[in-house]
């Protein structure tokens, strides 16, 4: 009855046991409530005085309040469970996110992940809240009520008993029919909403081509077509609710007539007959509740499946640890031999990379878009593991490891992409990211070195200015400087990975930034992927990549003189525009 | 709530649309509940009457018939009500979509960057969905419950005014007092919860894009703490809200217990005179139960209002943001275009003191090519929008052949072609996407344009060729190819003035060079104004201006500037990577 995933959540069995007890007590309260209400009515019917009603009314009231107080208690304990379980799932998901790193996340889709972690978990919580309670109620309450009705009047019991499976069968049949239709409809909906968003996003384009008026009618037409197809699905989909309602009310009507006939024949008294009539709607209530919320729970179920799938992905972690590695220095050595990597089975993203580096060097990586530069940097950052990790392609200071996915290595690197991570907080907090306990003085010193002070001095709150979301917006150049300051603050980060950090800056801003960066590069191992040629002269060594292969390597001078692929690439980048 | 509805133009007017259908929906809704009440009422009477052992079954013939009728009527009317209410809402939604489109079309908003990334669009598209739910889940059930309540009280008034007053007070508590109290007590909390969710959303988005940094920082707990910092606050607030809701639901149930007891006492007093009357006691008591189904959703529905409030406010705010075109439109012929001029133009957004453009004058003659360079964020794009007439100068004017450009807005699409950073491709075939440039062009013209921009071979290599859908069948056009498709459109459009707004941003330098060469080749003879932030490809321009902080810092031909201007020379050297540090 429950989904397997649901049963695997800790605490769910205990909750079900608790809810089952409560539902049983509740069923008894429902029976008593119906009984005492009927006693009161029958007393009136027998033309008794109001005093004869007082006690039954009191007992009715107590049973009624007990019944709904149990609902209240059930809601609370279910909610406790749902909140706790959802919180744990969310923590697991976020922990996984942390372990997976940037490349794997972009494969899953960052938007998808964020939506899952926030909206998805809400839906899961809702799913937990609804499904467990409603299922337990549906399994217990009708059974107990039915037993009571059987004991009171056999024929009514039979009637109500027979209707139950009919309802279920009809709901399944109609549900399936609607499902098939709504799958097609879902495509219709996506088409419609895509057309809507498409037209809106293209509004500027349409306007520039003088077509925007015409599209308003087109939009309306598409939307109307969607309405028509939706209506045809709804007509079927709502039939399942109709069937549920129909059999419920009809069976109550039938029971009423049976009871009437039995009463006329004197086979039953009014009190039991009335009790059954009051109980009949309550008998169907749990099924109707379940049916009403069934669709609402589907989203939660899907979200749960999605999250469990992500949790199953293996996080990159190296089996062999670089436990002796204490940081990069002038004698450190990294050897990479025959490194391979592929995102999927069909194509190799990196092929047989061989490369050695010793001491503080500045290594430039060049190549066309899609040549594997970023993948290689991700490999060096330990966010990806080689596909041939078992052949131990990395060698750090003589120790062979399968990948660099380990904190022993990662705590010595820093990574500066095109858009460095700036979070909502003060500039100080952003700089102290790797070293949250740094002193104000230390922060000031590195901000100075990173060339941030000119900008900071113009701000009223100085280093305590809030930046990021709902704070001050900062330019791309300043974001880069904050990332640099961050690196400088942590003495242990001797390895700098830069992935086209200046690609979107204008040339003058880039040039100013360069003056700050070059001194910082000294005493670091720098691996720098870029398209901007002027950096090449500042590099000690250059790697040229093409289609996942390392096609050339050497000092800049060597490579220019070789007149090979590097030279070709540079000419192409520079363009034919040599004589302005 | 009242204030919002007073100025509303997105909900109220539509309630009057398709009036007959709407009345039908309410009618069916009310009918459904009267069948539900009727079924229990008649059933109660039926068994009471039967219990008096009438000599013949025919005595209860009418009640028997009625139970069946009500038993069938209730689900049937409910079904019809749901079908028709959805139909009405979807009809209105179609109108709203069109309305949103036309509103945006005339608003200045589509010029903003938020619009281009689509954030705003998805929000607005969702707002329309919210309105759909507002009708279905809040407005309709509430209206039906109120009508039902009023009719019930009127009927009871005929039978016994004392009982009617008792019910009136009870209904008022359930339908009016408790829902309003809910909004008052928890409305603020719901808004607070939403702000927390919003904050978590941006926090997690930031952190997800910075996950590489988090990973190498090794601070797993720091990360978890940061992205879940609002969770405990949110859980606590949610718990308070839900606790309130549970208690409220319990209170509503207790109200029904009181109604039932009131009904018992009243029926004992009112029907005590004869057995014939006493048969109705059960009818009235049972008749109360279906009211629960109608009334309980109202207090829940009302509480959802804060959720919709933002959507309603946002849509209403949109309508106030229209640009009014200059009423005096000129019918000048673009074929006779001679020159476009900017005369001492200054621009700042209304209410902002900083001028984005300061005293800029420039002149471009037919067939000339002007480049506007400068660092990002110095108002280059603003300058283009001023030239287009999409923005109106605070001071000075933009004229084409002496006519103010604001007077050419009706014909803007005949004067200007624009190629910007993110050309938009519609979810249709390559052929149709290019044909947008000129709807009357033949397939041959379109194919020729595609050939001109150098995409012929690639498109032909695709399995569906020119009929390939640009979003589907696994074909993804790269940045450079998208620009080329957009360029083909412009060739078909064949307008005298072409504005290029950094079309090569985000392309790698090799792709960029190829595109620039193509631009040079196909735009020969056109008047071109090209905004860029570096110097690649400037040698073919007639004139270069360097924009900084909104004003012109250098201008001249590229070779003059190279010869006489050290800054330009240095920029050039840096761009070519031949500078020595």
Image: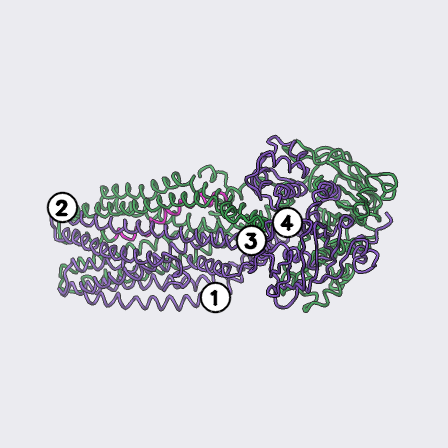
Chain colours: A purple, B green
Q: Earlier in the sequence, mark 3 or mark 1?
A: 3
Does the segment drawn in magenta span residue A403? Answer: no
**Mark 1 and mark 2 in contact (Cβ < 8 Å)?**
no
Pointer 2 chain: A
**Mark 1 and mark 3 in contact (Cβ < 8 Å)?**
no
Q: SS class of the residue under badge 2?
A: loop
Q: Earlier in the sequence, mark 1 or mark 4?
A: 1
Q: In the rendered view, does A146 fall on the left or right side of A574?
A: left
Q: SS class of the residue under badge 1?
A: helix
Pointer 1 chain: A
Residue annotated with mark 3: A111
Q: SS class of the residue under badge 4?
A: strand
Front one among B388 and A308: A308
Q: Earlier in the sequence, mark 2 or mark 3?
A: 2
Residue annotated with mark 4: A415
Q: Position of residue A61 (x, y in %)?
A: 21, 48
Front one among B31 and A23: A23
Q: Earlier in the sequence, mark 2 or mark 1?
A: 2
Residue annotated with mark 2: A50
Q: In the rendered view, does A418 fall on the left or right side of B202?
A: right
| Mark 1 crowdedness (10 Å alpha carbons): few <14, some 14-19, many ≥20 | some
Q: Which residues are magenta?
A: B287-311
Q: Nearer the viewer, mark 1 or mark 4?
A: 4
* Disc assigned to residue A181: 1
Front one among B501 and A391: A391
Q: Disc 2 and disc 1: Cα gap in Å?
A: 58 Å
| Mark 2 crowdedness (10 Å alpha carbons): few <14, some 14-19, many ≥20 | some
**Mark 3 and mark 2 in contact (Cβ < 8 Å)?**
no
Q: Disc 2 and disc 3: Cα gap in Å?
A: 67 Å
Q: Disc 3 and disc 1: Cα gap in Å?
A: 29 Å
């Amino acid at each position: 009855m429950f989904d397997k995933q649901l049963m695997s959540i800790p605490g769910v069995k205990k909750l079900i046991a608790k809810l089952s007890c409560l539902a049983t007590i509740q069923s008894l309260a429902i029976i008593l409530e119906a009984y005492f209400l009927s006693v009161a009515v029958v007393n009136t019917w027998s033309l008794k005085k109001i005093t004869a009603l007082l006690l039954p009314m009191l007992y009715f009231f107590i049973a009624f309040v007990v019944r709904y107080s149990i609902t209240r208690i059930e809601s609370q304990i279910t909610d406790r469970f749902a909140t706790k379980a959802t919180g744990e799932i969310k923590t697991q998901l976020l922990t996984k996110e942390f372990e997976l790193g940037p490349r794997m996340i972009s494969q899953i889709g960052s938007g998808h992940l964020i939506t899952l972690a926030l909206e998805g978990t809400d839906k899961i919580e809702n799913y937990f809240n609804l499904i467990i309670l409603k299922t337990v109620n549906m399994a217990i309450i009708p059974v107990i009520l039915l037993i009571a009705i059987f004991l009171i009047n056999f024929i009514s019991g039979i009637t109500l008993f027979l209707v139950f499976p009919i309802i279920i069968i009809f709901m399944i049949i109609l549900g399936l029919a609607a499902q098939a239709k709504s799958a097609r409809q879902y495509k219709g909906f996506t088409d419609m909403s895509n057309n809507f968003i498409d037209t809106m996003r293209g509004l500027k384009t349409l306007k520039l081509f003088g077509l925007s008026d015409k599209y308003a009618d087109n939009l309306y037409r598409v939307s109307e077509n969607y309405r028509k197809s939706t209506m045809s699905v709804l007509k079927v989909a709502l039939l399942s609710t109709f069937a549920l309602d129909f059999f419920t009310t009809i069976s109550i009507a039938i029971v009423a007539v049976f009871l009437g006939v039995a009463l006329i024949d004197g086979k039953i008294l009014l009190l039991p007959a009335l009790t059954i009539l009051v109980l009949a709607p309550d008998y169907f209530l749990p099924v109707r509740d379940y049916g009403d919320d069934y669709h609402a729970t589907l989203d939660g179920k899907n979200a749960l499946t999605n999250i469990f799938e992500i949790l199953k992905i293996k996080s990159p972690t190296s089996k062999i640890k670089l436990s002796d590695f204490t940081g990069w220095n002038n004698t450190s050595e990294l050897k990479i031999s025959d490194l391979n990597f592929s995102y999927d089975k069909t194509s190799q993203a990196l092929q047989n990379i061989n490369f050695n580096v010793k001491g503080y060097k500045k290594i430039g990586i060049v190549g066309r878009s899609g040549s594997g530069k970023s993948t290689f940097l991700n490999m060096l950052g330990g966010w990806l593991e080689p596909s041939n990790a078992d052949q131990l392609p990395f060698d750090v200071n003589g120790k062979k490891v399968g990948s660099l996915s380990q904190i022993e290595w990662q705590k010595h690197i820093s990574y500066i992409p095109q858009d460095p991570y700036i979070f909502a907080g003060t500039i100080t907090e952003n700089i102290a990211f790797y070293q949250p306990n740094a002193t104000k003085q230390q922060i000031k010193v590195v901000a100075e070195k990173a060339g941030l002070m000119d900008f900071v001095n113009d701000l009223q709150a100085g280093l305590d200015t809030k930046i990021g979301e709902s704070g001050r917006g900062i330019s791309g150049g300043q974001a880069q400087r904050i990332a640099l300051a961050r690196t400088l603050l942590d003495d242990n980060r001797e390895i700098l990975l830069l992935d086209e950090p200046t690609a979107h800056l204008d040339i003058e801003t880039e040039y100013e930034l360069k003056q700050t960066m070059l001194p910082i590069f000294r005493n670091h191992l720098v691996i720098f992927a870029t398209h901007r040629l002027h950096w090449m002269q500042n590099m000690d060594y250059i790697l040229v990549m093409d289609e996942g292969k390392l096609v050339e390597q050497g000092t800049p001078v060597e490579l220019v003189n070789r007149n090979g692929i590097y030279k070709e690439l540079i000419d192409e980048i520079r363009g034919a525009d040599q004589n302005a | 709530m009242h204030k919002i509805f007073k100025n509303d133009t997105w909900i109220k007017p539509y309630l009057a649309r398709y009036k007959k259908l709407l009345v039908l929906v309410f009618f069916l809704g009310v009918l459904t509940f009267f069948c539900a009440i009727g079924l229990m009422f008649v059933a109660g009477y039926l068994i009471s009457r039967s219990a008096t052992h009438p000599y013949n079954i025919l005595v209860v013939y009418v009640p028997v018939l009625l139970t069946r009728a009500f038993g069938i009527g209730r689900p049937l009317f409910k079904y019809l009500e749901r079908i028709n209410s959805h139909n009405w809402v979807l009809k209105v939604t179609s109108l709203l979509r069109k309305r949103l489109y036309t509103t945006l079309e005339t608003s200045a908003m589509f010029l903003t960057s938020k619009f281009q990334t689509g954030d705003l669009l998805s929000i607005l598209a969702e707002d329309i969905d919210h309105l759909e739910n507002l009708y279905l889940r809040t407005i309709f059930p509430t209206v039906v419950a109120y009508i039902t309540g009023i009719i019930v009280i009127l009927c009871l008034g005929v039978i016994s005014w004392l009982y009617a007053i008792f019910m009136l007070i009870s209904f008022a508590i359930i339908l009016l007092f408790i829902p309003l109290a809910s909004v008052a007590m928890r409305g603020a909390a719901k808004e607070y919860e939403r702000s927390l969710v919003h904050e978590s959303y941006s926090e997690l988005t930031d952190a997800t894009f910075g996950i590489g940094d988090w990973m190498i920082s090794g601070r797993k707990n720091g990360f978890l703490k940061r992205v879940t910092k609002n969770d405990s606050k949110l859980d606590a607030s949610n718990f308070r809200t839900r606790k309130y809701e549970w208690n409220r639901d319990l209170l509503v149930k207790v109200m029904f217990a009181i109604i039932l007891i009131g009904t018992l006492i009243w029926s004992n007093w009112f029907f005590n005179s004869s057995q014939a009357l006493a048969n109705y006691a059960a009818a009235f008591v049972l008749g109360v139960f279906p009211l629960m189904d109608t009334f309980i959703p109202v207090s829940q529905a009302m509480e959802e209002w804060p959720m919709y409030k933002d959507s309603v406010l946002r849509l209403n705010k949109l309508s106030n943001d229209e640009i009014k075109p200059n009423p005096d439109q000129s019918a000048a012929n673009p074929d006779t275009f001679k020159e476009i001029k900017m005369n001492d133009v200054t621009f700042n957004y209304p209410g902002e003191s900083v001028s984005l453009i300061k005293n800029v004058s420039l002149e471009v003659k037919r067939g000339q090519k002007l480049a506007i360079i400068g660092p990002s964020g110095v108002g280059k794009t603003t300058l283009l929008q001023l030239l287009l007439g999409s923005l109106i100068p605070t001071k000075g004017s933009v004229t084409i052949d002496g006519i103010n450009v604001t007077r050419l807005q009706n014909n803007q699409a005949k004067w200007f072609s624009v190629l910007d950073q993110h050309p938009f491709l519609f979810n249709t075939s390559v052929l149709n996407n290019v044909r947008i440039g000129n709807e009357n062009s033949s397939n041959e013209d379109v194919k020729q344009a595609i050939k001109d921009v150098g995409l012929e071979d690639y498109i032909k290599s695709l399995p569906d060729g020119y009929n390939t859908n640009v979003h589907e069948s696994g074909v993804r056009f790269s940045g450079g190819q998208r620009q080329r498709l957009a360029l083909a459109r412009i060739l078909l459009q064949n307008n005298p003035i072409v504005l290029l707004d950094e079309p090569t941003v985000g392309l790698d330098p090799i792709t960029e060079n190829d595109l620039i060469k193509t631009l040079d080749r196909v735009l020969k003879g056109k008047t071109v104004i090209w905004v860029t932030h570096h110097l690649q490809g400037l040698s073919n321009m007639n004139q270069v201006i360097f924009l900084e902080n909104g004003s012109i810092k250098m201008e001249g031909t590229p070779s003059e500037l190279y010869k006489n201007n050290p800054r330009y020379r240095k920029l050039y050297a840096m761009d070519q990577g031949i500078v020595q540090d």
